[in-house]
Amino acid sequence: MTDVVVTGIGVVAPNGWGVAEYWDATLAGRSGLGPLTRFDSTGYRAHVAGEVNFTPEEHLPGRLLPQTDHMTRLALVAAEEALADAGADPTTMPDFSAGVVTAASAGGFEFGQKELQALWSKGPAYVSAYQSFAWFYPVNTGQISIRHGMRGPGSALVAEQAGGLDALAKARRHVREGTALMLAGAVDGSLCPWSWLCLSRSGTVSPRRDPQRAFLPFDADASGGVPGEGGALLVLETPDGAAERGQHRHYGRIAGYAATFDPRPGSGRPPGLRRAIDTALADAGIGPSDVDVVFADASGVAERDRAEAEVLGAVFGPRGVPVTAPKTMTGRLLAGGAPLDVAAALLSLRDGVIPPSVHIGRPAHPDLDLVRDRPRPARLGSALVLARGHGGFNSALLLTS
């Protein structure tokens, strides 16, 4: 099979703006979680979030601001960084040779809420024409492709947390089929009253107000996840294709991938996460002993964490592989969370270090070799990234140096 490598990374995260700032903060254990500031959370069940605050006028042309949701503005910034990091300018490439695949969980929810408020309070004449697409799941793919002249394959996937890995895998297929360059991943998030109500009523979000105690995956005191916004977009190419345009550096290779779906509740059949891991390893042509680190899904919901820990123990053996969850510093970023883990995994392979999971004081699973508090130097040649989406989605992506 054709090798597909990552030549560029763009990041927007609650604990860091851009790859360098995010990675410095992650290795230092600096969390971006804090009290929700976008609106008054009094009366809601949850109060802590991972927010990315920036002034869009400093990063984007004014014509884009009226037609974009906060999520899309973040995605446009991440796309620009990823392409610049790869040294790629799609506008100079042949038509249809560069494409975009993104994932989203709910689209431009915040934009949609504002327009619905205008409809209810003032009438249809006050609803923006941009509402027709600014809320839509594929909006990030569309806006990025328009801005950078990327007229090749374009699509969007919806599988909640798992969707970001699925987008990278779909982009890998396009590159293997002949598309020269693909930009893929996800930047997601929706921190507005409408979405906050939906998230907090799901029963999976922590009600704690202390940012250091709210999101504790694999901890005896786990009380749920913490929503956040942000993510990562990556540039995918073949090594030869990148070299032809003068780019000889890459972060790593997407070596294996699989996606599964859980059986219906009450069926008595096991969840599909293990099958996703086994199939991704088979796709990469390696065994469990060849995996050097796992970036866990780490939901923060005790039952789901236990299920993940049991699967990791079954696949790798007790304390058989280091496990980390740097998302403890950002929150769960919906579709953007897994691509951000992929970015962190690639940086780990580059630098020979495993980033820590923070705030975990009472590990609930002694057979899990959880990297806590401080980075762990390690010789790394491969990394497995896991993601599970609401409703039963499971995805696994295997990276090699």
Image: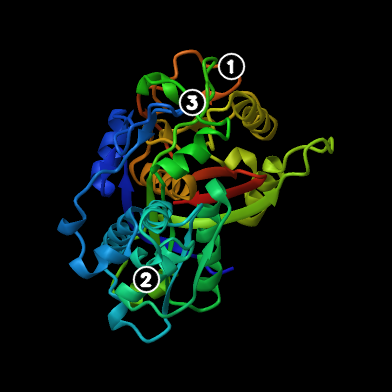
Outermost residue, bottom direction? 95
Tag 1: residue type? Pro
Residue bearing mark 3: 206
Residue at 54% over, 44% down: 384
Residue 214 appears at what percent x and percent y?
Answer: 43, 23
Judge whether 209 appears above or below 112 on screen. above
Residue 85 appears at what percent x and percent y?
Answer: 27, 61
- Asked whether, in this view, residue 376 is left or right of residue 383, the answer is left
Residue bearing mark 1: 366
Q: Secondary structure at mark 2?
A: loop
- Confirm or deny contact between disc 3 and disc 1 (CB under 8 A): no
Crowdedness of circle 3 by 10 Å Cα count: few (<14), some, many (20+)?
many
Outermost residue, top direction? 362
The alpha-carbon separation of the residues under discs 2 and 1 comes to 55 Å
Looking at the rendered image, the disc whose residue lies closer to the viewer, 3 or 2, is 2
- Confirm or deny contact between disc 2 and disc 1 (CB under 8 A): no
- Asked whether, in this view, residue 379 is left or right of residue 254, the answer is left
Residue at 42% over, 35% down: 331
Residue at 34% over, 64% down: 126
Residue 196 appears at what percent x and percent y?
Answer: 45, 39
Q: Secondary structure at mark 1?
A: loop
Residue bearing mark 2: 129
Residue 236 in view here? no
Tag 3: residue type? Ser
